[in-house]
């Protein structure tokens, strides 16, 4: 296994390359996977790697780090990678633009919550108008998540000020100085805030079972591949390795090892890692319904193209 930085292009460039027949990886048994580095969004890939599940399936896996969702999808479309860690906000538009992409399991239920600073005066989503919310990037999954929560409550998203700051480490000084009132955080990033002496109180839940609206059906991670790779000999072994990883994540016997992985891979403080792992183990179903997929397509299209849900049928590889 090798790891190296991602060298990508803009999504528009990748789409052009694909349309012209550009990009392609050799069919030599190796598999390159584009990942968010040090992020729970890439958890099944990290588990399959660390626990030898890729090796067991005879796969020579290379991880390629990406800075953001558009870069990861552009690398997949352009042929730099065979699989990528995606999200509805990047996968859906690419398919609508004619890219032959297919999702594969496990699917990451949305691991985002709006968490507020102690002096923000915010206790519910209805208190967000006029407040400053830190997100990794404008137009990304975090902003779309907030916009949907606001829309479900008939709140105008323009009343909220988004402040782009990535990675999580760059948001911490903003919170410390009082320059933000809230942030869109994963359980892991909230633990990092807490370790820095900045307690953040979530006002939305990341538990899809106990939530409503986008928090109940939203997907934070959609592993995705190309139709070409889906027809290759490596497709079935990849599916098997990732299914094994999902089972490992859900197994209570792996709590300690999972917490250690979070500390080593994602910089989650050791004293918070067990708590964070507990929030992760229920977030990775190996199957989702076509209805849930359509709900995510609708969520994306309502904020972007406004296209029909029928433009993106549910066609999973596994």
Image: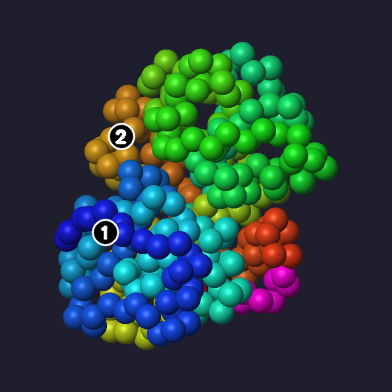
Write the residue at 76% across / 34% down. Answer: 159
Can residue 180 be seen at all in this image of the molecule? yes
Q: Which residue is mark 2?
A: 267
Write the residue at 38% across / 45% down. Answer: 39
Q: In the image, residue 90 lies at what x, y percent? A: 53, 61
Segment colored magenta = 307-315
Is 317 left, or right, of 309 in this rendering?
left
Above or below: residue 240 compared with residue 108: below
Which residue is more in the foreground, 35 or 313?
Answer: 35
Which residue is more in the foreground, 247 or 110?
Answer: 110
Quadrant (top left, top right, bottom left, bottom right) of the C terminus: bottom left
Is 168 left, or right, of 258 in this rendering?
right
Q: Which badge, 2 or 1, is on the more N-terminal residue?
A: 1
Above or below: residue 167 compared with residue 49: above
Q: Main secondary structure of the magenta part?
A: loop
Q: Is residue 42 magenta?
A: no
Look at discs 2 and 1 and give the one toward the viewer.
Answer: 1
Tag 1 secondary structure: strand
Is 93 left, or right, of 281 in this rendering?
right
Q: In the image, residue 251 lies at what x, y percent? A: 35, 50
Q: Which residue is mark 1?
A: 63
- Name the disc covering residue 94, or none: none
- Please identify the quarter of the rendering in which residue 315 is found: bottom right
């Amino acid at each position: 296994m090798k790891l190296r930085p991602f060298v990508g292009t803009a999504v528009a460039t990748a789409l052009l390359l694909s349309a012209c027949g550009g990009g392609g990886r050799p069919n030599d048994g190796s598999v390159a996977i584009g990942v968010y580095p040090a992020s729970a969004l890439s958890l099944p890939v990290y588990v399959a790697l660390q626990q030898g599940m890729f090796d067991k399936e005879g796969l020579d896996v290379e991880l390629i780090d990406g800075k953001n969702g558009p870069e990861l999808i552009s690398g997949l479309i352009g042929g730099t990678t065979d699989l990528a860690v995606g999200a509805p906000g990047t996968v859906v538009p690419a398919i609508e633009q004619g890219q032959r992409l297919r999702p594969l399991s496990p699917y990451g239920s949305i691991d985002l919550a709006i968490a507020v600073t102690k002096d923000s005066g915010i206790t519910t989503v209805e208190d967000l108008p006029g407040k400053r919310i830190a997100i990794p990037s404008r137009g990304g999954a975090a902003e779309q998540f907030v916009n949907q929560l606001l829309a479900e409550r008939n709140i105008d998203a323009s009343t909220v000020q988004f402040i782009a700051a990535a990675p999580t480490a760059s948001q911490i000084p903003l919170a410390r100085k009082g320059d933000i009132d809230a942030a869109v955080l994963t359980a892991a990033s909230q633990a990092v805030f807490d370790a820095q002496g900045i307690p953040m109180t979530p006002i939305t839940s990341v538990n899809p079972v106990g939530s409503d609206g986008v928090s109940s059906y939203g997907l934070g991670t959609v592993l995705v591949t190309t139709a070409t790779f889906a027809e290759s000999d490596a497709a079935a072994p990849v599916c098997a390795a990732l299914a094994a990883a999902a089972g490992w994540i859900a197994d209570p016997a792996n709590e300690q090892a999972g917490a250690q992985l979070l500390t080593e891979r994602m910089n989650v403080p050791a004293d918070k890692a067990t708590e964070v792992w507990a929030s992760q183990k229920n977030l990775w179903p190996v199957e989702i319904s076509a209805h849930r997929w359509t709900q995510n397509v609708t969520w994306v299209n309502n904020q972007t193209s406004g296209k029909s849900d029928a433009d993106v049928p549910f066609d999973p590889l596994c």
